[in-house]
Image (spheres, helix red, strand yellow):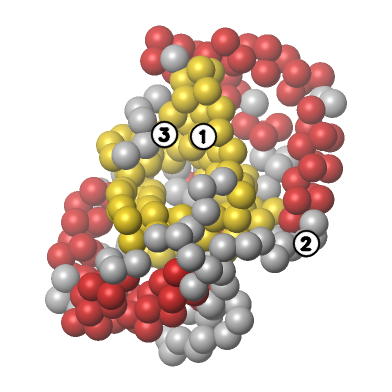
């Protein structure tokens, strides 16, 4: 795919330009008591149909990386923005079944965190990048049970209004060489690029999926990483991106059985 640099591609998180109806992504992280994780997971699976009345794209737990173990990680894509989020969460909170579920898991949770992101415009400019809404509409939870993983790659960028737009420009220029690198595992797929809007600003996440029913996610990820190291444009782009970043970390997540993104 050929990158084009529109206002959507080069958007800044330095100051929010969202309206109440602009599409948003919510990242929620619940730190659980290790002794109660199994109880939380059991109740959450049993109530998954209720949770999926919200636009849930992903629900999983970390296997390794920077996100603490025993953390429930979930992503929601609200095309109707903060207004849709408010209305749909309020409607869910009124349901007796949801109240019963919360009563069963409340004591399992030690800490809750919510952050708001927007999908970078380049997500809609590359055919190989699906975006989160795709997975809500094409729920793959019926095909769960494989060895797929979801990889979160987090860039914390320097302060400044130009930092995120410059990052996205460099990223879009370099991305085709990574997506098309010889030897990339066929199951590896870039799901989305998220830019923080409420929470810690100048944060960018890459969300990748690797593996499937008949292929190991960790092995697929490693194969694709090795392939990307041979992509000259990608390596050059990352060298420039590194100058904009203060830190970089990754986490490997295992989807739950009801997660649309598998």
Q: Residue at x 28, y 37 (%)?
A: 64
Badge 2 vs badge 3, beta-carbon distance below 8 Å: no
Badge 2 vs badge 1, beta-carbon distance below 8 Å: no
Badge 3 vs badge 1, beta-carbon distance below 8 Å: no
Image quadrant holding the N terminus, namely: bottom left
Residue 205: percent from left, percent from top: 44, 56
What whole-number distance in Å separates the C-alpha atoms at marks 2 and 1?
24 Å
Q: Residues within 10 Å of mark 3 (few under 14, many from 20)?
A: many
In the rendered view, would you say 23 is above or below 230? above
Give left or right: position of 213 versus 138: left
Q: Residue at x 43, y 40 (%)?
A: 255
Give left or right: position of 173 versus 183: right
Q: Nearer the viewer, mark 2 or mark 3?
A: 2
Which residue carries the number 3 mark? Answer: 61
Residue 177: percent from left, percent from top: 29, 81
Instruction: Report the number of discs.
Output: 3
State the SS at label 1: strand
Q: Residue furthest front?
A: 160
Which residue carries the number 1 mark? Answer: 29
**Relative to the observer, which residue lies in front, 112 or 262?**
112
Which residue carries the number 2 mark? Answer: 19
Tell me the tag on residue 68.
Answer: none
State the SS at label 3: strand
Q: Earlier in the sequence, mark 2 or mark 1?
A: 2
């Amino acid at each position: 795919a050929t990158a084009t640099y529109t206002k959507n591609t080069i958007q800044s998180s330095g100051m929010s330009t969202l309206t109440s109806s602009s599409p948003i992504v919510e990242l929620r992280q619940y730190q659980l008591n290790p002794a109660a994780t199994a109880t939380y997971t059991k109740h959450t699976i049993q109530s998954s149909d209720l949770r999926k009345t919200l636009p849930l794209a992903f629900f999983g737990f970390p296997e390794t990386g920077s996100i603490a173990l025993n953390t429930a990680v979930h992503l929601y894509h609200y095309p109707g923005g903060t207004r849709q989020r408010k209305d749909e969460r309020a409607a869910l909170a009124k349901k007796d079944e949801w109240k019963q579920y919360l009563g069963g898991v409340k004591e399992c949770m030690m800490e809750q965190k919510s952050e708001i992101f927007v999908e970078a415009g380049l997500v809609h400019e590359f055919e190989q990048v699906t975006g989160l809404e795709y997975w809500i509409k094409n729920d793959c939870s019926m095909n769960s049970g494989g060895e797929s993983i979801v990889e979160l790659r987090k860039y914390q960028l320097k302060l400044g209004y130009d930092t995120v737009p410059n990052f996205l420009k460099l990223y879009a220029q370099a991305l085709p060489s990574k997506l098309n690198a010889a030897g990339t595992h066929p199951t590896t797929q870039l799901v989305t690029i998220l830019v923080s809007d409420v929470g810690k600003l100048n944060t960018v996440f890459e969300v990748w999926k690797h593996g499937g029913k008949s292929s190991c996610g960790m092995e697929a990820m490693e194969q694709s990483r090795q392939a990307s190291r041979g992509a000259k444009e990608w390596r050059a782009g990352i060298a420039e991106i590194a100058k904009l970043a203060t830190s970089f970390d990754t986490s490997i997540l295992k989807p739950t059985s009801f997660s649309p993104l598998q």
